[in-house]
Every structure is written in structure tokens, then in C-alpha cells.
Image: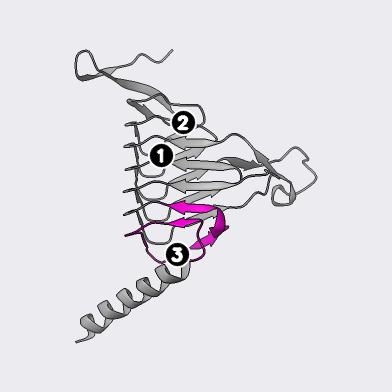
């Protein structure tokens, strides 16, 4: 009996949560499921497409700390955002349809400044470093960090990689900073090694 009550409680909590947030988000699609988020800030600037799943204890934010006139976090249709992800936009982060992220992924279009060594970093301004777009059908492995860079469509970003520069479509990138190691060749229909310059 206890498992049944627990299951009903979880479903009721999820239902009430989705009703509460569907009225506060900029857009909240059909079939969206957000499991026990850690934090959500700037809901009015956040759009989540149909049938997207945002897993346990993720953090979503779209707050113009850098003074941008427009701030957005858009997550497309059919995405799966892993456990303990943090996605923090101060101007623009767009995650296109059918993107998959593993656990503990961090995506940001901003950084704390640290120019003044006499002031704690937490008390210094937040700096815009670029907008972020993650192309449709891409996969970000466990622990990936994306900082103010774009990732093309149908890319694979290896576990614990740090993306600070744009990655083209149909690439596999790994490392700190992330470098392209394979590209899909449409002529041969194969993923081929890519020499790092």
C-alpha cells in the first residue's frame, strides 16, 4: 500500500507543479515534465517545448543580470535535460528540438568578472560572454560545460568537455577546451577522424 500512496503523491505533486508553472512560463508546452527543480528564476523569459523532460534537481534561469534588453531561455520540443543540470541565461540560450543532455551539464552565456583582485569574485559584476545555441539532435555527455558558444546540430560532446568556441554541425568534440575529433562525411556516410590543428 505504501508504494501506491507514494506513487500517487509523486503524481499529484508533479501535476500541481506543472499547473503552477504553466501559468508563469513564457511558454509551457504540452506534455512537459519538470521533476523537482532545484531553482527556477525568470520564468516569464523561459519557454519549454512540447514533450520535453527536465529531470531531477535541475536549475533554469533567464535573468538579465548583464543589462540585456532582452533575455531568453528557449528549450525546444522533445528534449531530455539530465539530472542536476544548470542552464543560466542572462541574454540568450536556445536549445533546439530533440537535444539530450546527460547529468551535471552546465550551460551559460555569462561569467563572473574577476578584474579587481581586492573585491571577492561574488561581489563583482556578471559579464556577457556571448549567446548560446545548441543545435537539434545533439547530445552533451556527463559534466559538459558550455560557456558562451554554439554547438551545431547532431553533435556529440564528450563527457567533461568544456565548450568555449563554436562547434560546427555533425561533429564529435572532446576535451578542455573542447576540440573537434570527428566529423560526419555526408559523401561517404561515415564519421571520420578530424585532425586537430
Q: Tell me where residue 30 appears, x and y as whole percent.
A: 34, 59
Of 3 and 53, the residue lying toward us:
53
Q: Which residue position holds label 1?
A: 160
The residue positioned 20% from the left and 19% from the top of the image is: 190
* Above-or-below relation of 57 to 106: below
Q: What element does badge 2 sit on?
A: loop
Q: CA distance from mark 3 to mark 2?
A: 38 Å
Q: Using a 10 Å C-alpha cutoff, classify the residue at mark 2 as few (fewer than 14 neighbours), some (14 to 19) or many (20 or more).
A: few
Q: Are marks 2 and 1 in contact (CB under 8 Å)?
A: yes
- The image's colour scheme reads one colour
Q: Which residue position holds label 2?
A: 176
**Residue 112 sits in quarter:** top right
| Sooner in the amino-acid sequence: mark 3 or mark 2 | 3
Q: Tell me where residue 95 appears, x and y as whole percent.
A: 43, 42
* Above-or-below relation of 72 to 32: above
In what quadrant of the picture does the C terminus appear? top left
Of 31 and 134, the residue lying toward us:
31
Q: Which residues are magenta?
A: 22-48
| Sooner in the amino-acid sequence: mark 2 or mark 1 | 1
Residue 121 covered by magenta stretch: no
In what quadrant of the picture does the N terminus appear? bottom left
* Above-or-below relation of 188 to 9: above
Q: Which residue position holds label 3?
A: 22
Q: What element does badge 3 sit on?
A: helix
Q: Tell me where residue 187 appears, x and y as whole percent.
A: 22, 13
| Mark toward the viewer: 3 or 2 | 3
Amino acid at each position: 500500500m505504501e508504494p501506491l500512496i507514494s506513487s500517487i503523491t509523486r503524481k499529484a505533486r508533479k501535476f500541481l507543479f506543472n499547473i503552477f508553472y504553466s501559468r508563469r512560463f513564457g511558454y509551457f508546452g504540452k506534455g512537459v515534465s519538470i521533476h523537482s527543480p532545484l531553482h527556477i528564476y525568470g520564468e516569464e523569459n523561459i519557454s519549454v517545448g512540447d514533450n520535453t523532460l527536465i529531470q531531477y534537481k535541475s536549475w533554469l534561469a533567464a535573468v538579465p543580470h548583464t543589462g540585456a534588453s532582452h533575455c531568453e531561455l528557449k528549450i525546444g520540443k522533445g528534449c531530455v535535460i539530465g539530472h542536476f543540470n544548470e542552464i543560466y541565461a542572462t541574454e540568450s540560450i536556445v536549445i533546439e528540438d530533440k537535444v539530450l543532455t546527460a547529468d551535471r551539464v552546465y550551460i551559460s552565456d555569462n561569467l563572473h568578472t574577476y578584474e579587481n583582485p581586492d573585491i571577492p569574485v561574488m561581489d563583482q559584476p556578471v559579464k556577457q560572454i556571448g549567446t548560446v545555441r545548441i543545435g537539434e539532435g545533439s547530445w552533451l555527455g556527463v559534466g559538459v560545460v558550455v560557456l558562451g558558444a554554439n554547438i551545431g546540430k547532431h553533435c556529440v560532446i564528450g563527457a567533461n568537455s568544456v565548450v568555449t568556441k563554436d562547434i560546427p554541425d555533425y561533429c564529435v568534440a572532446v576535451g578542455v577546451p573542447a576540440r573537434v575529433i570527428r566529423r560526419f562525411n555526408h559523401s561517404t556516410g561515415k564519421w571520420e577522424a578530424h585532425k586537430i590543428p
